[in-house]
Amino acid sequence: MNVSYGKWTNHKTLILDDQLKEFLPETMLLTEDNFWRLMDRHQQVIVKPNMGRFGNGLLKIKTIDTGLYEFRSNMLKTIIHGRMETYKAVNSNLISRKNIVQQAIDLAKINDFPFDLRIMVQRKKKVASWVVTGKAAKVACEGYFITNIAQKVMIVQDALDNSNIENINPNELIKRIEAITQLTAARLSSIYPGHRIFGLDIGIDKSGEIWIFEANYAPSLAIFRLLGDKKTLRKIKRFKRH
């Protein structure tokens, strides 16, 4: 297997794990019925292409009032009246035939900008155990709701120390994130046997709850180059070789 099965298959695999399902935002294949089911339940959702990368094609829709919705795509933000017109806007902005709709999470912030984490998890050849080899925080640019276009890449400890997360113990939170991501990689290896690297996108809300957003099958190292952490880059590359 040398390509990803996509976000929907990954989600269906992870949701079967009793230790992981609490960390997964509610997710469904996109249909009009499923879209409104999640909107009515959570008041805001993210729509993603099943096979998309780099944040391409992401949409965010939020209920403002009865029959009034905020529609966001990249930096575009508009207010739409009515359910019919709202879903029409969603449908006209899709870039893929197969999409998912997901409960949107209000991310923790640094100076009022949302951030999330990229966690690199790897294993060596003929070794079953997974190791966290890199961690970085991505802070969204002004006007964006996603961090793929980041204004800053930070060391995770520094990001947590400067965030609005309530009653935080950064060391304990990092330990939990590492354990969750190692378990996530192990679970995904059941559908990707032989695969040895995942880049996991992890969200944290202001209450300190951890959310698994996405598993990247072929993660870029660009984030870690921007971080300027040569030791981490060497470790990631060493695991890829061995």
Image: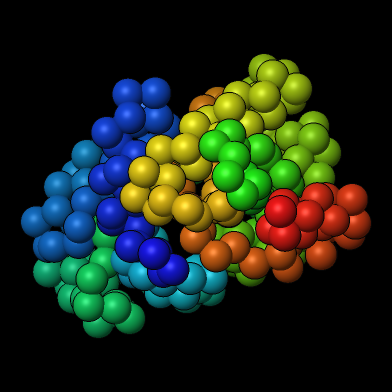
Horizontal placement of 37 versus 191: left or right?
left
Compared with 91, 229 (above or below) is: above
Q: Foreground: 38 or 199?
A: 199
* Res 108 seen here: no
User: x and y percent of residue 240 in the render?
Assistant: 69, 58
Q: Residue furthest front?
A: 126
Q: Relative to residue 56, is residue 42 drawn left or right?
A: left
Instruction: Answer yes or no: is residue 186 visible.
Output: yes
| Residue at 9%, 56% in the rendered image | 33
Provide residue 17's location: percent of width, then percent of height: 33, 30
Give the x, y percent position of residue 9: 28, 54
Q: Report the residue at 85% width, 56% height from top.
A: 234
Nearer to us in this view, 151 or 119: 119
Q: How is the image coloured?
A: rainbow
Residue with the most extreme left position: 33
49 shown above or below 172: below
Give the residue displayed 81% in from the left and 64% down from the top.
225
Percent position of residue 162, x then y: 79, 37
- Tell how many labels: 0
Instruction: Report which quarter residue 176 is drawn in.
Output: top right
On screen, 175 above or below 130?
Answer: above
Measuring 36% from the left and 70% from the top, which residue is drawn there? 51
Position of the N terminus, as image quadrant, is bottom left
